[in-house]
Each structure stands twice: as structure tokens, then as C-alpha cells.
């Protein structure tokens, strides 16, 4: 008996399950966790030394932008870990879709880079760019999986709507 036949899961659960079992999810998960580790190593090591060598105003900008990177990555990692928990059966998809587990801190994470970012060390600018890219991709996934509750129809759904509108001629 399939899960659709059993009536135990909604189509949303199946969509989330199929996503969390996909190669796309695994690549995104691996990328996110790797970026978290890389960023932590940089900020705790070479980044500290680079910040000390910056003029005061630029060092303050460094501090703010490093917090933005950290916020993006912690939000992304939390979201990815929740989805992994759903896939592993440690959490149900309904709980994962609650606001508590949705991607957060959008006002900080989507915020544009401050003036003077070009003065920051190259490594931090690279982490800013990569974390922004990851966060935006996860935000789109979050919206598709948990947003309005209705996914846009695929090709079959569109064909069905056309057939209903124009009949089988």
C-alpha cells in the first residue's frame, strides 16, 4: 500500500519527503554545513587578525557584516537540520511547517550590504556573497514547501485545466 492509499500522509508530506530525499537537498545540506564550518574557521582565525588590521570604521563594518554572515548561516543550518529530521523520521512534516521552524531573520539576512563593503577583506566578502546565495535559495525552497500551501501546477495540471476549459475536441 502506498502512503497515498494509506491516508496517513498529506500530499505536502510527500512533497517534503521527496525533497528531503533528493540529491538537491543533499547538495544543499552539504554546502550549507560546509559553509558554516568554513566561516567559523575564518572568523575565529584569520578573520580576527584581518579585523585587527582594519581602520576603526571599517572594523565596525566588519563586525556588523560578520554578524550578518553568521545569522544567515545559522538560520540556513537550522532550517536544513529540521528538514533532515523530517527525512529521518525524527520530526513530522506538519511540525516542520510551523512558523517556529521556518526560515527566520529575513530582515537581517536579506538586507543589502552596507556602504564600504568593498573595503572589507576578500574572504569576508566572498562569505557574504556565498551565504546570501545559500540563504536566498533556502528562502525559495521554504516558500515552495511551506508558503501558501499550494504549489503551482505542473505540466499535467496545466493540460488538465486546458482540457476542462476547452473540452476534449
Image (tube, rainbow, N blue to C red):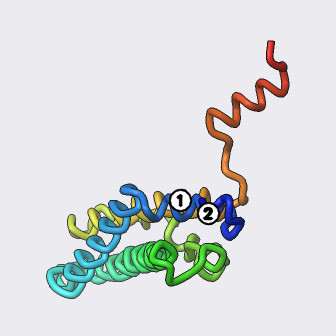
Q: Does the rendering let one see residue 15?
A: yes
Of the residues under marks 2 and 1, which one precedes in the sequence? 2
Q: Which residue is mark 2?
A: 3
Determine whether, in the image, residue 97 is placed left or right of residue 48: right
Residue 159 x/y as whole percent: 70, 28
Q: Quadrant of residue 51?
A: bottom left
Residue 84 location, quadrant: bottom left
Q: Nearer the viewer, residue 115 or 33?
A: 33
Task: Examine the rendered structure and indicate whether residue 45 appears above or below residue 61.
Answer: below
Binning the other alpha carbons within 10 Å of mark 1 as few (below 14), some (14 to 19) or many (20 upward) gives some
Occupied quadrant, residue 88 = bottom left
Q: Quadrant of the C terminus?
A: top right
Q: Is residue 52 left or right of residue 100?
A: left
- SS for dot 2: helix
Where in the figure is residue 17, as x and y percent of width and height? 53, 64
Q: Secondary structure at mark 1?
A: helix
Mark seen at residue 141 = 1
- Residue occupying the point 68% across, 65% down: 6
Q: Position of residue 25 (x, y in %)?
A: 41, 61
- As drawn, the label of residue 107 is none
* In-image side of 110 versus 152 (left or right): left
Q: What residue is shown at x 26% (from left), y 76% (from top)? A: 39
Q: CA distance from mark 2 to mark 1?
A: 23 Å
* Disc nearest the viewer among 2 and 1: 2
Residue lying furthest front: 1
Can you give x and y, in whole percent of width and height, for residue 48 in the image? 20, 86
Amino acid at each position: 500500500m502506498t502512503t497515498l492509499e494509506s491516508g496517513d500522509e498529506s500530499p505536502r508530506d510527500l512533497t517534503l519527503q521527496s525533497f528531503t530525499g533528493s540529491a538537491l537537498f543533499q547538495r544543499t545540506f552539504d554546502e550549507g554545513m560546509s559553509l558554516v564550518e568554513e566561516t567559523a574557521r575564518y572568523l575565529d582565525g584569520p578573520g580576527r587578525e584581518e579585523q585587527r588590521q582594519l581602520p576603526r570604521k571599517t572594523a565596525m563594518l566588519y563586525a556588523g557584516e560578520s554578524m550578518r554572515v553568521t545569522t544567515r548561516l545559522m538560520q540556513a543550518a537550522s532550517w536544513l537540520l529540521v528538514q533532515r529530521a523530517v527525512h529521518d523520521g525524527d520530526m513530522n512534516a506538519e511540525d516542520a511547517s510551523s512558523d517556529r521552524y521556518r526560515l527566520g531573520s529575513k530582515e537581517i539576512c536579506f538586507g543589502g550590504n552596507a556602504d564600504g563593503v568593498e573595503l572589507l577583506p576578500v574572504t569576508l566578502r566572498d562569505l557574504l556573497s556565498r551565504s546570501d546565495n545559500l540563504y536566498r535559495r533556502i528562502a525559495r525552497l521554504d516558500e515552495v514547501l511551506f508558503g501558501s500551501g499550494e504549489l503551482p501546477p505542473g505540466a499535467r495540471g496545466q493540460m488538465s485545466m486546458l482540457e476542462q476549459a476547452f473540452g476534449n475536441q
